[in-house]
């Protein structure tokens, strides 16, 4: 049972539009706060998009996600889970990136996560572009490679861009495999689609044993069947969940930099996460939410709705 | 057969963007107009949102719905119904609310509807927030409780907000049951979803006999099966239909104040109404359309498309 | 195998936001360019909307489609087709219309297409409102009537508007049948829906033998079944494909002038085109993309995604 | 003193967002209405933009101007004029144009105005693109040429476009001079600016005696001096006032199709009209308001604010 | 000299888009925080718009103002003032209103301010609609009537709306005078303009001795002259500053509910505040910022820029 | 007299919305094109924003500027200059940056400009964030330091950000002085305003002899007086003109990342450039136009209007 201190402010008490916005109206607990050691799941913002190769914007993601998250209430209507009662949740604030230096930023991110992990905190990240996952994995997988359930329209397994640039939002998982942070045989990528340059990423996946489930297969087999396979692939060992908002169809989530049409709708976007129940989740992220392309704010609201589902499966696994 | 006076202006004659916009380009017939007694179905605007607990805006709903409604033509393509030929329809104008006094506004609304009902008119309402349904029901159910088919993502069955405030858009049907306007055993709520504060509303529904069909059940069983049950619940007695635009997924209907992701698409939004064919409908409403959050106008257009479907089932039942 | 000159610029080399935007980053080859005779498929813009009866805007379509098309890569992820390697593709520029004279504009369009066809080029058109298809068909069908697969929410088979005006975006295919450009028995219209004035267009279709598949039937039977019938209707003779963006649900494609709610989603929008594989396609168009109503740009991106699918089936048929 | 029937609805009684929107909340009086002969100043919508050479949209102008006009109250704060008490004002509805036929539309417009003028009504027009002024002048100047004060960033004195097209929104006043509707020596054009094709229009103006006051001169001399000259030019004979919204800087009035930066601000936009006090105004128009490019609605609100100032000088002159 | 604890986070250290947004990146100090007694100037949000008679939205003002305020740096470039070094500033959070009960909300606001004033804090308010000023003045003027410099396009001196409703955003200063909170002879209202219902408010002002400087006089005399008179009117006694964002021209500040065209530009908007240097300011507010009508966010940024100028004159006076 | 090849396409021939958009509808002449040696003034896009410390977006600038530039006609209405007749102008395309590597990008830019300068071309740049000016100056000033007229709201003279990062859009001119590219005594910065971190940049300017004219001085003295001083400062030697769009008030130019309220309007924005007539201009740039924050496109249109004025003074000086 969670501590009363870690309960979100209710919209029945304080209207949702009032107050300084923290993630899901949770208390803000800085890394040097006395209460930090009591936190079980920490939501961390990474306002950073230096890995973007096309349309920037995810640096603004954490702030808008916090704003939209004030619409989230305490109980999962579909599953009945009350995550804030199950575990102690808090907003740990943002990692301060260096917008003009990619490597300095990655070092800052990994250092921040190491401090949180030292406190026994399981991190739920609000990115940031997808390169964010790399410095996070350098912390989460510091003791050895983890498995990954990866929702996305792209594999992000490319070798390099623009004549040799190796750190972009199209390369994080190639690097993570190379650095021994991911066990490729325990990685599944779901929702891949769109036009392609060539098969370079697919060939790498095949060679390493990464399982790719394209969107055509996803729709044909249906969510229960696909997700059963995904659970089997990652098994009961430590697993990271990476959720790129562009997994979802861009009509539902326009606020992102590299949209691909023909994706899942918002109901499916939530439902795939519920199927992660019971996994051994050591961290999760929601990345590529780009407010400048989300004029109506719907992407951020859908993004935090997915984050709440992620939190529910994280809390529920932490309970046992 | 309807009167020629009550035919909408055709877009083949006058372009859709021309003319003072009335609902569906019907004649405007004020309550004190000589032709009022000939009206069968009256479309009434209630530009009011004082019951809103989060993001206001539905006070602007009727005007934008009128504007978008000029896109509606005379015949239902799917069912072949031509409602304006079946019954005399008219735009009865707006109830003038008092934006700074909730109870004064509710009294004005009920009084307006009583006058319309005295003329034998069946009202189709363009709200307004969902509290609108309460003063409308005080008129429609003035002779006794009615049944209700309620499309929404929320139950609106809460007791009170903000330390005891009993009249908000989250409480109308709790009040309507308490006031004997609704027969709870003849009420079905369809599409409920999203995060929840707790189970207070669900417990009330269960205790009173209100049937709640959550969105997960809705998608699993499919529309024909769900709607057959809905028709059975309300039976052949007098039935009200309340349609909150947030029943529909917010990607399709972003212009609303309390969106919940993971809802029906626009085809499903129309189709559920067609399944009401044959019911004894004594009134219907479309509420929570909020233009300030509907930058592209799509919500209003979808809202009037649903209103046209409602009109078709109302007209078709009135014909018999 | 295509010529190296006709390869699009890769986003791995030049970022997608850089460079003068041509269709799919292909070379711009004017009709009087020396390389014109080497072009197999020519993408042509027709920035024209004088046939619009309600909300104008498609005159801005080609420019925004070019901009969005820089997101398209070289390979179809779903089918593996690489159209730019299969055939020589190029951007042939825009036909210059006369915004203030409908007939002068139609003559200019037909003349432009005749020149392209004289070079053996198969045209893929970026409209323009749907009246665009008429002057294009006057060129494509100059040797005799062709069949047509037509995706749309409207039949565009009306006789006239506003007291006798015979050339609007609601009449092109009535005129095309009358002028002997289309063989009505080889015409299938898919996705028809929305409110209707009356049955005038439906009656014409029935009398001429045009097959209409309404959206209700489309969803009930499913894409494979519907498209098999469509392929059978047009057979192996010369076939034109006309794709009105309002075939797609307006939530996915809001940037259009006469939206009808309740249509296919973006995945279905792409998939129907893939089912045209193997047809004898002599031309295709994407019409009614209206940037002023597409504030977030999603419609244009979806439009070019469909154009890429059209190009794939055109290239693939040209290969054999 | 005006008739009580012709008073606008007060926002103190009915909130501004309620009710079917007519111009300035005045009664709608059709040309065949019994009260038509009592109208002194009639506000007429002309939803038409077939003369547009670049970005269309003014066909949507009258509807949005009506909506925005509900913000207008009864008294001019700056001058104290109460126009609705001075003369009988009414909304006469819209002329129904033919979007696909320019000449048919012009004939319809002139016919509508002739009927209004036959009733002794002075027309205040809400356009429509600037070609609208031509058919209006054909009615207003049917007894002989009138003078004109013309606020605009363009002269609209061009001969033709696109190889000979003579009726566009860049040519109305060339035609009006040629047709003897305007006395060029009594015409003054104020605010001209922007890049130019050449000096064709300027040469025509000089040859005919039309006075052009460019924006540089306007700002240098100041409004009182410039407007004194304008009053002297038109004198005490019949004068038409044509106000193109693009006279105003596009930051203040973005909703227009051919903006030119570097124009007057909103205070100056109102003030120039006040300087028309005492002229013999036989008609006025506000044209080129284009809602698709006015996302925030500010252009329409500024447009109706100018229309109210025009109404005040018209009413004030009519009083005497 | 201020305490180091009360310094804002620098954008040179943490990028402006990072971190939980508080007003001007100041520390958040709740009323029950240990540091509260060290605060000199407290910025307080009042997310409330129940007094709005037309377009609601200011309830969302404080949150967007906080977001935009992260762009504010430490030093006033024009005057050299460094307010955060001069006095201890903090974000005191938001008053929690009751959106469905006006009087309950007003009581909550006054109670919150009384607690802050008990700590010796001078309040700078981020509203909220203009009715907000009334409950704030009930606290600020609890020991006796104060003077007021009031920037606005409306007098807000009306008696009542909608048949007797006395508490709206059009009535706060009528009530404040009646309740003895304002000394009318020490009140000056600057920028008044727009259409008017009648002269009721002006007559009240004249009878009470309130000085109204309309916009025409403001522009004619110039800022130094007008503001010298304003300073003379309020003198050296306790003075409140109320700044309605609609004082500024709506092109510069579109995000507000009752715009009036023809107002000051942004440079003038800032400069008038600098002229308050040396006054004895006991509180100030920035009200009527309405995010739903501020799509580009410019209004909020201008609003916080004005708030920073207010803070500078408050700090500078507090220093002496 | 210029070559006929280098004339822009007229909007009288081809409507402005038609055709592949190049800068001002000029021919596109790549660096390796045979005609490159005939170009006098080359417009070059630099789609790059890696130097941005807050809100990114200028990487999208060149494309939107090209689109908006199709509104530019051949003649300067205010000065009568016809630049395209005076000198041969062309669109040289975009420099391809590396979005993930600042130094690689700077090298690519300098290399591109060196090639253009080798052909005797004077470059007019469409950025890009303000760091763009540094690699451009490395080329333009390769033979020795140049003078600079710099329009901006910021000095961009800071030493470093985020703990030592020396290449951001806040540092280019500090670096340019250090690298000997600018002669600080021949540099004038006009329009500086907004809140400041401290006086570090001002102190540097004072020490080096750079003249800063703050916005308060600019408005007080007026444009003729200020610009006369600016001309005197740079004298008759080689001078670069750098124009940051945020020099202009953000209401007129919202599409930029670091806006400062209280700046010049659009008329003043153009007029300052006209006062550069007669200078010895060796290059000019328009930077910081950020389309994601320019929803209505007005910033881009104002940006190209300024670019046209720059081109006029460049052409006019080149003529002599």
Image (cartoon, coloured by chain):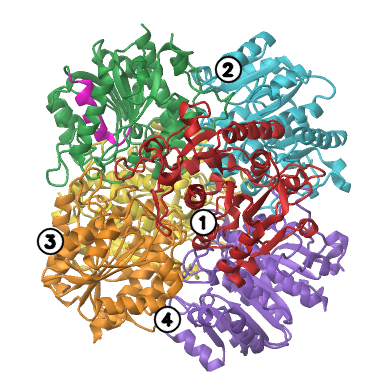
Chain colours: A cyan, B yellow, C green, D orange, E purple, F red
Residue that carries the numbered disc 3 in the rendered image: D111
Mark nearest the camera among 4 and 1 is 4
Distance of mark 3 from mark 1, alpha carbons?
51 Å
Residue that carries the numbered disc 1 in the rendered image: B169
Distance of mark 1 from mark 2, alpha carbons?
43 Å
Image mark for residue D78 = 4
In the visual, does A206 lie left or right of B243?
Answer: right
Mark nearest the camera among 1 and 2 is 2
Residue that carries the numbered disc 2 in the rendered image: A213
Q: Are marks 4 and 1 in contact (CB under 8 Å)?
A: no
Q: Quadrant of the N terminus of chain A?
A: top right
In the visual, does E226 lie left or right of C200?
Answer: right
Element type at marker 4? loop
Q: Is residue E104 above or below residue B182?
A: below
In the rendering, at what x and y percent does residue C40 appear? 35, 15
Instruction: Let me know if marks 4 and 1 both belong to one chain.
Output: no
């Amino acid at each position: 049972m969670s501590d009363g201190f870690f309960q979100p402010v209710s919209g029945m008490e304080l209207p949702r539009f009032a107050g300084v916005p923290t993630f899901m109206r949770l208390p803000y607990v800085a890394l040097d706060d006395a209460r930090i050691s009591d936190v079980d799941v920490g939501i961390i913002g990474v306002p950073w998009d230096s890995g973007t190769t096309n349309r920037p914007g995810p640096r603004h993601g954490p702030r808008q996600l916090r704003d939209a998250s004030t619409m989230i209430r305490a109980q999962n209507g579909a599953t009945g889970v009350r995550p804030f009662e199950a575990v102690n949740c808090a907003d740990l604030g943002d990692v301060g990136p260096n917008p003009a230096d990619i490597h300095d930023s990655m070092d800052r991110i990994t250092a921040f996560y190491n401090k949180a992990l030292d406190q026994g905190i399981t991190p739920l990240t609000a990115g940031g572009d997808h390169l964010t996952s790399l410095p996070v994995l350098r912390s989460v997988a510091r003791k050895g490679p983890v498995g990954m359930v990866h929702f996305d329209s792209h594999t992000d397994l490319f070798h390099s861009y623009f004549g040799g640039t190796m750190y972009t939002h199209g390369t994080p998982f190639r690097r993570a495999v190379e650095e021994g942070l991911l066990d490729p045989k325990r990685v599944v990528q779901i929702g891949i689609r769109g036009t392609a340059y060539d098969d370079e990423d697919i060939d790498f996946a095949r060679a390493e044993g990464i399982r790719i489930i394209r969107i055509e297969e996803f729709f044909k087999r249906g969510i229960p069947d696909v997700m059963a396979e995904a659970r089997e692939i990652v098994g009961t060992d430590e697993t990271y969940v990476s959720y790129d908002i562009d997994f979802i169809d861009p009509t539902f989530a326009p606020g992102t930099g590299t949209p691909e049409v023909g994706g899942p709708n918002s109901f499916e976007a939530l439902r795939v996460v519920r199927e992660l129940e019971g996994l051994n989740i050591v961290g999760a992220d929601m990345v590529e939410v780009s407010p400048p392309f989300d004029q109506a704010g719907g992407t951020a609201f859908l993004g935090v709705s997915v984050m709440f589902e992620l939190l529910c499966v994280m809390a529920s696994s932490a309970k046992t």
